[in-house]
Amino acid sequence: MTFQSHKLIISLSLLLLAVLGEGCSMIRGDKPLPAVQMVQASLGHEERCFAKALLSLKEGNERDAQTLLEEVIAGKPLPGMTDEAFFRLAVLHLGDEDGNGDTQTRDLLARLQKEYPDSNWIRQATPLISYLDEVDVLRKAREVLNARWAQSQSQLRESNHEVKTLQERNLSLARGNKELQERNHSLLRDNKDLQKRLDRLKDLDIEIEQKN
């Protein structure tokens, strides 16, 4: 740990106490203690935002913490603080409900690795990056399965349509076959009637010949 990082940790610890002390003073209606004012004055905007972000996280107010951490990483880079802000903000973005949380988390971790390659928080980020890689693999596999399922459903609908078409054609052929059978029966009946008439005509011819 560098002297600058050690100094920053001490300053932030004092600032957290200062923030808590300021809150108690405000509740009592008192003015902030001189020591509190001195600590606040000695720290920059990014450091104050970072201390308030840690306090917000402790209180479970992730939205405010996210806003404050974004101010930290947008401000003056401070090794030992800004890199931690990158990591904490990346973790917070995992809970985003807009569907872009994984992308923002990956972007923040990439910036952490690029801008602070010697940061201790990179070791914390490594398993998180591995987790995101696994999520990407599972997401792509799910997309492939969904595409295959959609394709199979489309093929199934086409097959059902073809089966329905064949059933309709079969039904039409069955009706046509029935009509042909009825016509055949009718022709057979007509043929029998015609044969009977011919037979009668022959009998009449024979009777006429016999009488003559």
Image (cartoon, helix red, strand yellow):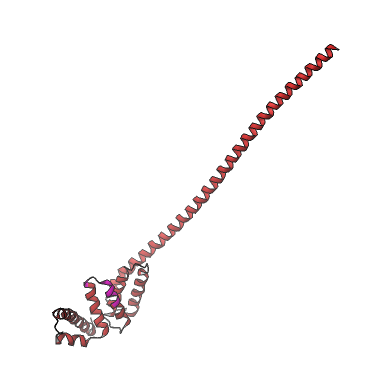
Residue span colored magenta? 58-67
Give coordinates of residue 32: x percent, y percent: 16, 84
Position of residue 140 in the picture relative to residue 4 (left or right): right
Magenta residues, dominant SS class: helix
Q: Is residue 154 left or right of residue 204?
A: left
Residue 167 coordinates in the image, percent (x, y)? 55, 42
On the image, which quarter does residue 8 sit in? bottom left
Rendered view: 65 above or below 131: below
143 sits left or right of 51 in the view: right
**Residue 108 image-quadrant placement:** bottom left
Give me the residue at 73% from left, 23% from top.
Answer: 195
Residue beneath the point at 62% across and 37% down: 176
Name the residue rendered at 73%, 24% in the picture: 194
Between 194 and 112, the residue placed more toward the observer is 194
Q: Quadrant of the C terminus?
A: top right
Write down the quadrant of residue 127 in the picture: bottom left
Q: Is residue 64 magenta?
A: yes
Farthest-out residue, right: 212
Residue toward you, 81 or 159: 159
Q: Count all numbered tags in the image, as a single digit.
A: 0
Indicate yes or no whether the magenta region holds residue 125: no
Q: Quadrant of the N terminus?
A: bottom left
**Where is 203 relative to 186, above or below?**
above
Residue occupying image coordinates x 73% and y 21%: 196
